Image (spheres, coloured by chain):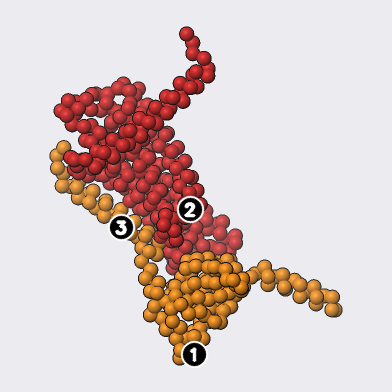
Chain colours: A orange, B red
């Protein structure tokens, strides 16, 4: 078989394009390059986390700053959620965590809201102020219940 | 003496087991040829050209159209629930998890694996492999192994290209044609696809499918009857057996992955 520089070049280009496609899927789409988990590990306990799952994003003011790494049940039967956040963040002890939904039926994520204290949270600390997930079914149920009560009062 | 029906069943089972054993030994011989010198690097490059570069057009065209039709169907499905923002998620996940690796494997089986089987089978028919043996060149090392290995190496790249073209096709239809927001299409896609869970599964599938297509095609060619009918039987046999085993392996990999998660855990 004769050596063919053109064919070798085509193969080289093909491998390059193929590897670039794999890299795009892995880094950009798969989010492998996300450098956020720089080590600020915070814990938040919620009464109700709804449909929150591990790897859900954690955002501050809508900007993604980390992700949920684990969800466990506390001895006192609350959901204990571990967050892995960008280590360069300065979050004070008054920071509150809430579980929100993107859109009406979208994925759930953890939203952090900084407070105004001077004392900063360290890795391993617990976020004291938390707001549970809003349960749509619960809300509708309460609404119908209240409406029924209102009818009876009339 | 006519053999009894039960005897016939037994003979078939033994025959199938023998085939399976011969196939395993064939794969082991390829593995040995890859590890042991001489290394046929130039032959491998030629095969990557035949399988990979020549499949580029068909893979990219199919990927783009499949992504476009996914977006079109998905849009009308999702818009009923007012969830058309999830179009990127849907197109991306379907392409990465299922259609990318599976359709690439089926297309490559039809285009390249069948040609591989026919080439080796006609080499058997025209006694070219015996000629190689006479010159004390191992035909598995010189002819078979480069083809099979090239198939294994090329499949993940083709699959990734298929997925990227599909995402682009979906973008074209979803954003340019149907007027969704381009940012939300790409963001929802990037946020819902995870490397360890989804992309790694996709690449593993492509590798396994490449191995299935490559080994089955070369085996069918290598063991073909040295007749014109043998060549055509090897070709059709390759397409049928490789396609069906790709689809079956797809289910098995998906089920195992869902049950045990990615290797090494999340």
Residue underneath mark 2: B260
Q: State the quadrant of the N terminus of chain A.
A: top left
How far apart are the alpha carbons under marks 2 and 1? 45 Å
Please state the chain letter of the residue tagged with numbered disc 1 in the rendered image: A
Residue toward you, A15 or A98: A98
Which numbered disc, 1 or 3, marks the residue that appears first in the sequence?
A: 3
Which residue matches tag 3? A20
Q: Chain of mark 2?
A: B
Q: Is residue A88 left or right of residue B135?
A: right
Pair 2/3: label in front: 2
Question: Residue at 44% of width from left, 73% of height from top?
Answer: A84
The x and y percentages for residue A72 are 54, 68
* Residue contact at pointers 2 and 1, CB within 8 angstroms: no
Which residue appears at 17% of the width and 25% of the height?
B134
The front one of B59 and B265 is: B265
Residue B167 visible in the picture: no
Q: Element under label 1? A: loop
- Image x and y of residue B55, in percent: 32, 44
Looking at the image, which residue is at 37% across and 31% down? B21
Q: Which mark is residue A116?
A: 1
Q: Read off the chain for label 3.
A: A
């Amino acid at each position: 078989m004769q050596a063919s520089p053109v064919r070798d070049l085509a193969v080289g280009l093909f491998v390059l394009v193929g590897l670039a496609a794999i890299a795009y899927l892995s880094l950009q789409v798969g989010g492998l390059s996300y450098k956020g988990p720089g080590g600020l590990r915070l814990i938040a306990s919620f009464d109700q986390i709804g449909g929150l799952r591990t790897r859900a994003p954690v955002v501050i003011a809508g900007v993604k700053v980390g992700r949920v790494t684990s969800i466990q049940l506390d001895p006192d039967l609350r959901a204990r959620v571990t967050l892995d956040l960008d280590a360069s963040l300065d979050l004070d002890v008054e920071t509150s965590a809430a579980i929100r939904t993107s859109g009406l039926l979208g994925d759930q994520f953890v939203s952090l809201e900084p407070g105004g204290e001077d004392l900063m949270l360290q890795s391993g600390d617990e976020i004291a102020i938390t707001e549970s997930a809003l349960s749509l079914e619960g809300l509708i149920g309460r609404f119908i219940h209240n409406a029924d009560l209102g009818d009876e009062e009339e | 003496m006519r053999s009894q029906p039960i005897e016939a069943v037994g003979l078939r089972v033994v025959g199938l087991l023998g085939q399976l054993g011969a196939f395993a030994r064939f794969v082991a011989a390829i593995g040995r040829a890859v590890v042991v010198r001489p290394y046929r690097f130039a032959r491998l490059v030629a095969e990557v050209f035949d399988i990979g570069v020549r499949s580029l057009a068909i893979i990219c065209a199919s990927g783009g159209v499949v992504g476009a039709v996914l977006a079109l169907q998905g849009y009308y499905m999702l818009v009923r629930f007012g969830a058309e923002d999830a179009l990127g998620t849907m197109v991306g996940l379907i392409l990465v998890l299922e259609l990318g690796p599976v359709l690439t494997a089926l297309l490559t089986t039809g285009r390249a694996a069948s040609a591989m089987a026919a080439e080796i089978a006609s080499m058997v028919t025209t006694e070219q492999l015996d000629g190689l043996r006479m010159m004390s060149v191992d035909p598995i090392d010189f002819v078979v192994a480069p083809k099979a290995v090239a198939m294994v190496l090329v499949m993940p790249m083709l699959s990734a290209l298929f997925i990227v073209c599909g995402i682009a096709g979906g973008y074209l239809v979803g954003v340019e044609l149907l007027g969704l927001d381009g940012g939300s299409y790409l963001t929802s896609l990037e946020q819902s696809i995870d490397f360890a869970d989804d992309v790694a599964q996709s690449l593993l599938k492509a590798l396994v499918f490449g191995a299935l297509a490559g080994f089955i095609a070369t085996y069918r060619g290598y063991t073909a009857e040295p007749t014109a009918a043998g060549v055509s039987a090897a070709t059709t046999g390759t397409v049928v057996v490789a396609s069906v085993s790709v689809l079956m392996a797809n289910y098995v990999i998906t089920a195992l992955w869902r049950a045990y998660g990615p290797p090494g855990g999340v």
